[in-house]
Image (spheres, grey):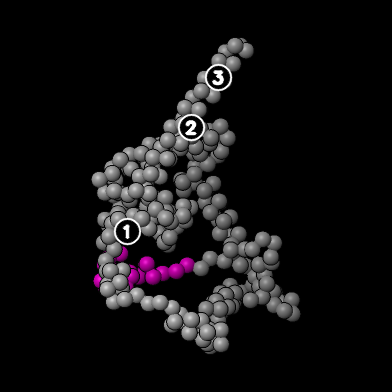
Amino acid sequence: MLEIRGLSIEHASTKKKKENAIVQNLEEEIKVLEDNFEENKTEELRVKKESLENIRKKYMEGVLIRSKARWIEQREKASSYFCRLEKRNFQSKRMTSLTKDDQTEITDPKYIVTKVKNFYSSLYQAKETTDIDRELQNLIQNLPKLTEDEAIKLNGEMTLKKATIALKNMKNNKSPGADGFTVEFYKFFWRDLGDFVLKSINESYRKGCMSVTQREGLIILIPKGDKSRKQYL
């Protein structure tokens, strides 16, 4: 039994080293392709990213199985477990009461919403120009300016190459829009979505205005450490 155990460990170790080497090579090759983007190598880049994604997915499945995490079976299903998780996340960000300076506690939802609205309306409203603002404006006016030819070259519709470079420089683990799609999603499916995204960008440029959903913004109150959520705004 000890001999079998030793052989199994040795086999697993050798296999893991080979997989790590494959992952490292793929990551290096992908970085080179992204840093030196060429249209004729888009398919090659997609295949390598897909291979890397499959390896990572297989690894994570193994981790989940070994950890016996409950959500391996229920992670995205509309189960009672998933709903309780969502409810808990919502409750953790919800402001259920406010405490005024005289220690009076307010629990009326309409009052709380009104106070939050007034707070952020005041925070983001236009303010009177100060001396520092005037100095900054003077500094900006004295900065070097583009010539008309330079401005023409920089303006105009976006190209797929420029959009690809911009996407590549975006940080992962971010959701740039209200739809929840992450940067990784766009990077992985860029070959299929790139043309559509580019058309949307250029349509906004031609009209001089983005779509309604692109102009939307969401403000989420995120609790700061141990700071009381009942503090009067």
**Which quadrant of the figure contains the N terminus?**
top right
Residue matched to label 1: 162
Q: Amino acid at mark 2?
A: Asn
Residue 104 against residue 40 in the figure, above or below: below
Residue 2 against residue 127 in the figure, above or below: above
Q: Amino acid at mark 1?
A: Lys
Q: What residue sits 25% from the left and 45% below the top?
A: 40
Tag 2–tag 1 contact (CB < 8 Å): no
| Residue 8 vs residue 88, the one in the foreground | 8
Looking at the rendered structure, which numbered label has been put on residue 10? 3
Q: Is residue 156 left or right of residue 71?
A: left
Mark found first going from the N terminus, 2 or 1: 2
Using the rendered image of the protein, determine whether residue 29 is visible from the camera's viewpoint: yes
Determine whether the residue tagged by mark 2 lies in a helix, strand or loop: helix
Mark found first going from the N terminus, 3 or 1: 3
Q: What residue sits 37% from the left and 52% below the top?
A: 186
Q: Amino acid at mark 3?
A: Glu
Which segment did they paint magenta? 201-218
Residue matched to label 2: 20
